[in-house]
Each structure stands twice: as C-alpha cells, then as structure tokens.
Image (cartoon, grey):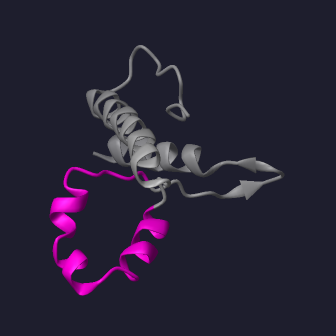
Amino acid sequence: MSWPLDPLPPNSPGDLLAASSAYAALVERSVIAKQRLGTSSPRDLAEALSFVSPNSYARRHELLGGARLLSLGRFFVDGYDIYPRLLVKERLASILRR
C-alpha cells in the first residue's frame, strides 16, 4: 500500500508532506498489527474486544498499548477505489482555502 499520490509533487505543501509521512507510519504499524493480532481492521479489533472478559477488557491498555490501526475506507466507481484520492482532494482543497 502506498500514499494515494505517490510520488508527491516536489512543490507539495509542508502539510501534505507531513500527512504523507504520518500515513506511511500508520501503514507500517498496520502491518505490525496484522502480524500480532491477525488483523489490521479497527472494526475487527472492536468486535474482538466485545467478546473478551471484563478483566481482560480492563487491561486493554496493557494488552494493546501502542497499537495503531489505519482505517481504510473504500469507495468504488467503475471498479476503482477512489476513496484515497477523495481524501487527498479534500485535504488539498482545505489547504488552498486558507
């Protein structure tokens, strides 16, 4: 998985470069979550937590400390997932409105 505008244009605003870096870090953490937990889906993790004992749930900060999961929305048009580009377009529009 890569940043939706890979590679970023050389004249990208600092905000976009920071967002790209954060996105890459979350993608990397998602891989680690999948290795450790068997999933990188926030929905799957929430569902699993609903089945644990109250004692384990109370210790979730110990058990899951540092876990970061990247929610990967999907929006298909003509068989293509355009969700990542929609996020980028919205972010760029917000930067330009400043």
The magenta stretch spans which residues?
42-70
What is the chief secondary structure element of the magenta stretch?
Answer: helix
- Which residue is the extreme one toward the top? 10
Q: Is residue 62 above or below residue 78?
A: below
Q: Is residue 21 above or below residue 32?
A: above
Q: Position of residue 8 (x, y in %)?
A: 47, 22
The foreground one among 85 and 93 is: 85
- Left or right, 39 with reference to 11: right
- Left or right, 68 with reference to 31: left
Where, quadrant-wise, is the N terminus in this rendering?
A: top right
Q: Residue at x 82, y 50 (%)?
A: 79
Q: Position of residue 14 (x, y in %)?
A: 27, 27
- Left or right, 1 with reference to 49: right
Q: Residue at x 42, y 13 (%)?
A: 10
Where, quadrant-wise, is the C terminus in this rendering?
A: top left
Q: Quadrant of residue 54?
A: bottom left
Q: Residue at x 33, y 34 (%)?
A: 25
The foreground one among 46 and 35 is: 35
Q: Position of residue 57 (x, y in %)?
A: 24, 77
